[in-house]
Image (spheres, coloured by chain):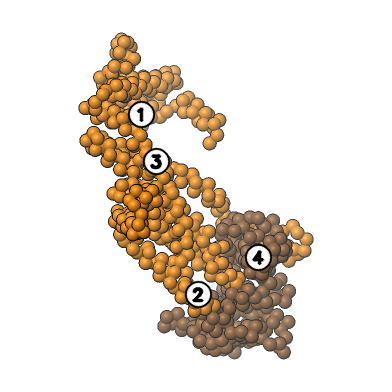
Chain colours: A orange, B brown
């Protein structure tokens, strides 16, 4: 939608008559009344204007009463409301409309005064404290301020793990799915047959084992196995820490784990491609491999894009289990901060909200990306109402002939129709 | 058109095929000479499509031989991909490559298999697309075409490999009646140009007017074969007569 369209849409929204004006604005007014009954904070700008606030309060109450009258009138005059109601008279209608805008504005002012200024005040006092405040919101603000670098480091690590892990897994999954879906062709020799069989069985086994064990256990196994192997080569613990850090081990775990799931997603997408596509490619003489690469796989990946992008969202969340091997992700960072302040609920609420923001941002971006990737959907045309168009190149006499024939057939059909 | 002194281009010998315990083709013997147009007719389930699909090994026969270029297609480990290059196939459901446009559909196999340059393949493809009357759709995505146009592109795609034999598996059965004509006309032109064709069809007029030989299949065997005049005017087998009266009544 262009800016111009948006603007004109907005203008119509403001100027048009609203059929449910009382129903919606009475709800808005009720919210405004609720805000006005909340205690004023230290930063409230309405505190010095008591008379204004009283006027606003009573205006909202009056609007609620008016709405109630209008709604009752409508219920009792259901059949001929438009003719009999005083609220639908052409002189009254614009007044009601402008009053309804005033209701929204008053409520907005109250919202800013109570909610936004209230939040700012809480923040100001919390940041000024030198020990953790007792109120929920103040405590969260105080802790976030004091440990911003810890949480920030955790968020960065989580994003790195999930993004790089998903990308690596995608490429590994492509390799693995090629191994998985191979079938033996008639022209293959024994060696190729063996390799194909071996590859396919390997991929199956990999998928079964990885999807059948928890990622937490996999993380432990991979980290300590890598650690043990490097220890055997005679490296010291600090040297190993430089090469085989918990982050690297975590990245390896999440990549290998996600590979198995992505392979199954890709396989599903490929198997959903019409077998006729493969048959047509094979009938032209393409080998199984060529038909796969050039025809089936591109369509299969396209089928799988929605489910593949879901893997990133899953990885953002599941990377939290990597904290067991000491990867400094968001989960580990939150645990660290909890260890300092012992405010479990406050901090895990923050962690949940950050994870939620990350996953929502990821799925929004991936949605855009998927839209960008897939070709514009072709217009749906039925077979029968499509015009037969004939090539303009010289030497297409045969097809002109065919057009005539088609026309003749159409004509015949029409004649038969009219005779019936 | 058919020269009887020629070696047959493709020869089917003692071909049998079963799906599970269901025997679909029973000891079929059948051959096609160079330049001949053969139509296979018969009721649904009589095995005519299976026979056609066996002829380029989209179905693997259980027994028998299919001789083509002196090689047995049905033999284990024959290079079927090489032999398929010379056998074009047109499917009932078109099976155009949905991820490619019309031109790329036609150039994919020649570029991949014939080691043609892209430009050379495109030239051949454009000529073939023009011969089916679709020049203005060269760059169109295949999903935007109508059924009849798709089937004509499918024919052009097969022709780009310069096949010696074209197999048509009910090419008009998925089309609306008023569209059938445009596809049949392309096929008629192809027949007139001397292409060897085997056509499985329910279009009796095409079988009667275009083909050199008609094969009637019933319950997995070739019940009767002969010239169109003989089959349509004077069928010898009662089964053929019954099938044709049912068809010609409609």
- Spot the residue most to the right: A394
> Height in image: B107 above or below B237?
above
Give the label on residue B119, or none: none
- Mark 1 surroundings: few (<14), some (14-19) or many (≥20) residues within 10 A: few
Nearest the eye: A261 or B41 = A261
- Mark 2 surroundings: few (<14), some (14-19) or many (≥20) residues within 10 A: few
Check disc 2 and report the residue beneath it.
A192
How far apart, in angstroms, are the residues tagged by discs 1 and 3? 43 Å
Please tell me which of labels 2 and 1 falls first in the chain: 1
Query: Residue B246: where, in percent of width, then height?
Result: 55, 78
Check disc 1 and report the residue beneath it.
A24
> Height in image: A136 above or below B60?
above
Give the label on residue B111, or none: 4
Secondary-structure class at tag 1: helix
Check disc 3 and report the residue beneath it.
A156
> Height in image: A102 above or below A241?
above
Please tell me which of labels 1 and 3 falls first in the chain: 1
Same chain for mark 2 and mark 4? The answer is no
Residue B32 is drawn in which quadrant? Answer: bottom right
Which residue appears at 59% of the width and 58% of the height? B100
* Any part of residue B28 in sight: no
Query: Residue A205: where, in percent of width, then height?
Result: 37, 67
Contact (Cβ within 8 Å) of mark 2 with mark 4: no
* Any part of residue A48 in sight: yes
Q: Which one is closest to the eye, mark 2 or mark 1?
A: 2
How far apart, in angstroms, are the residues tagged by discs 3 and 4? 47 Å
Same chain for mark 1 and mark 3? The answer is yes
Instruction: For mark 2, name the chain.
Output: A
Instruction: For mark 4, name the chain.
Output: B
């Amino acid at each position: 939608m262009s800016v111009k369209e948006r603007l004109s849409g907005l203008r119509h929204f403001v100027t048009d008559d609203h059929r449910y004006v009382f129903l919606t604005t009475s709800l808005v007014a009720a919210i405004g009344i609720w805000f006005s009954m909340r205690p004023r904070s230290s930063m409230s700008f309405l505190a010095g204007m008591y008379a204004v606030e009283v006027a606003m309060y009573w205006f909202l109450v009056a609007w609620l009463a008016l709405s109630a009258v209008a709604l009752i009138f409508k219920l009792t005059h259901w059949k001929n409301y438009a003719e009999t109601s005083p609220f639908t008279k052409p002189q009254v209608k614009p007044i009601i409309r402008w009053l309804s805008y005033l209701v929204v504005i008053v409520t907005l002012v109250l919202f800013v005064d109570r909610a936004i200024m209230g939040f700012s005040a809480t923040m100001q006092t919390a940041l000024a404290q030198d020990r953790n405040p007792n109120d929920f919101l103040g405590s969260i603000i105080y802790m976030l301020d004091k440990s911003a670098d810890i949480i920030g480091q955790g968020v960065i690590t989580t994003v790195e793990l999930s993004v790089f892990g998903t990308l690596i897994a995608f490429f590994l999954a492509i390799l693995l799915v090629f191994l998985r879906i191979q079938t033996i062709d008639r022209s293959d020799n024994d060696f190729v047959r063996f390799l194909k069989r071996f590859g396919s069985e390997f991929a199956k086994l990999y998928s079964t084992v990885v999807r059948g064990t928890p990622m937490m256990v996999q993380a432990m196994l991979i980290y300590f196995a890598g650690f043990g192997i490097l220890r055997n080569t005679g490296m010291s613990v600090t040297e190993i820490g430089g090469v085989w850090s918990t982050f690297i081990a975590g990245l390896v775990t999440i990549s290998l784990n996600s590979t198995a799931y992505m392979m199954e997603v890709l396989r599903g997408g490929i198997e959903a491609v019409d077998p006729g596509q493969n048959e047509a490619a094979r009938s032209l003489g393409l080998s199984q491999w060529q038909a796969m690469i050039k025809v089936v796989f591109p369509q299969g990946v396209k089928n799988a894009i929605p489910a593949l992008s879901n893997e990133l969202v899953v990885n953002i969340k599941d990377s939290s289990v990597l904290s067991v091997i000491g990867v400094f992700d968001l989960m580990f960072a939150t645990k660290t901060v909890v260890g300092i302040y012992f405010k479990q609920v406050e901090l895990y609420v923050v962690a949940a909200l950050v994870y939620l923001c990350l996953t929502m941002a990821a799925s929004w971006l991936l949605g855009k990306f998927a839209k960008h990737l897939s070709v514009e959907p072709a217009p749906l045309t039925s077979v029968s109402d499509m015009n037969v168009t004939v090539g303009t190149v010289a030497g297409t006499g045969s097809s002109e002939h065919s057009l005539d024939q088609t026309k003749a057939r159409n004509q015949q059909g029409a004649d038969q129709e009219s005779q019936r | 058109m058919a020269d009887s002194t020629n070696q047959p281009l493709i020869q089917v010998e003692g071909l049998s095929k079963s799906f599970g315990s269901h025997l679909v083709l029973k000891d079929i013997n059948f051959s096609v000479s160079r330049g001949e147009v053969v139509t296979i007719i018969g009721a649904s389930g009589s095995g005519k499509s299976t026979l056609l699909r066996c002829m380029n090994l989209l179905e693997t026969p259980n027994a028998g031989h299919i001789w083509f270029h002196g090689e047995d297609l049905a033999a284990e480990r024959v290079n079927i991909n090489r032999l398929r290059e010379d056998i074009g196939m047109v499917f009932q459901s078109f099976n155009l490559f949905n991820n490619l446009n019309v031109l790329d559909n036609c150039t994919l196999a020649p570029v991949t298999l014939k080691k043609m340059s892209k430009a050379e393949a495109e030239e051949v493809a454009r000529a073939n697309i023009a011969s089916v009357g679709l020049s203005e759709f060269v760059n169109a995505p295949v999903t935007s075409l109508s059924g009849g146009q798709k089937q004509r592109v499918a024919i052009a795609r097969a022709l780009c490999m310069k096949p010696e034999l074209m197999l048509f598996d009910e090419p008009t059965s998925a089309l609306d009646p008023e569209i059938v004509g445009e596809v049949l006309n392309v096929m008629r032109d192809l027949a007139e140009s001397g292409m060897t064709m085997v056509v499985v069809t329910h279009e009796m007029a095409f079988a009667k007017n275009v083909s050199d030989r008609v094969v009637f299949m019933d319950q997995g065997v070739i019940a009767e074969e002969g010239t169109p005049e003989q089959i349509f005017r004077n069928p010898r087998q009662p089964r053929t007569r019954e099938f044709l009266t049912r068809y010609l009544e409609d």
